[in-house]
């Protein structure tokens, strides 16, 4: 015997799991979320770049200044889920978001203010942004428009 069987999901559990999957935000929701990022410092700019780049939150949270090249963001294998280098074309709006970050001693583009380290308070920051925008979303939902 290998072990106990995993119990089958109930109908309610299946529906809840389906509801948690990424969804496409409407244009109005995207605009409302974008505007709610104003005045939220590094986190607000990080969310804006997530929306523009279609990258994962960890990839952008770990984005170092030397990974920004003239025409693209170069995400190294250690930062990506697949373990392969990923290059994202750099647009003017992305450049504007990155330029809005104040200079710091950290090598990161979006560092924590106090430590200069990688952003890690996702739950509270996303909840505050959801409340401010009135849009119920996950950070993964921000990737869906880029996949269209």
Image (spheres, helix red, strand yellow):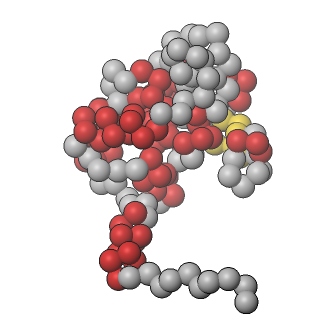
Residue 99, placed above or below residue 131: above
> Which quarter of the rendering shows the N terminus?
bottom right
Where residue 137 sits: x, y (%)? Answer: 35, 50
Where residue 108 sits: x, y (%)? Answer: 64, 23
Identify the residue at horizontal 65%, vertical 15% (top origin): 106
Q: Residue 69 falls in which quadrant of the image?
A: top right
Where residue 101 sits: x, y (%)? Answer: 50, 18
Where residue 19 sits: x, y (%)? Answer: 36, 67
Identify the residue at horizontal 35%, vertical 30% (top origin): 37
Can residue 145 be seen? no
Indicate left or right for 79 with 37 as reference. Answer: right
Residue 21, placed above or below residue 36: below
Indicate left or right for 130 with 100 as reference. Answer: left
> Residue 15 or 31: which is nearer the viewer?
15
Identify the residue at horizontal 47%, vertical 18% (top origin): 100
Can residue 86 be seen? yes
> Residue 144 or 59: which is nearer the viewer?
59
């Amino acid at each position: 015997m290998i072990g106990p069987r995993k119990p089958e999901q109930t109908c309610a559990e299946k529906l809840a799991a389906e509801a948690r999957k990424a969804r496409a935000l409407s244009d109005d929701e995207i605009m409302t979320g974008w505007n709610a990022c104003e005045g939220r410092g590094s986190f607000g700019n990080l969310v804006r770049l997530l929306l523009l780049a279609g990258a994962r939150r960890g990839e952008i949270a770990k984005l170092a200044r030397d990974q920004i090249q003239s025409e693209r963001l170069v995400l190294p294998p250690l930062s990506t889920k697949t373990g392969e280098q990923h290059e994202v074309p750099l647009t003017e709006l992305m450049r504007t978001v990155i330029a809005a970050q104040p200079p710091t001693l950290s090598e990161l583009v979006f560092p924590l203010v106090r430590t200069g380290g990688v952003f890690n308070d996702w739950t509270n920051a996303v909840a505050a942004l959801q409340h401010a925008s009135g849009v119920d979303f996950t950070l993964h939902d921000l990737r869906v428009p880029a996949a269209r």
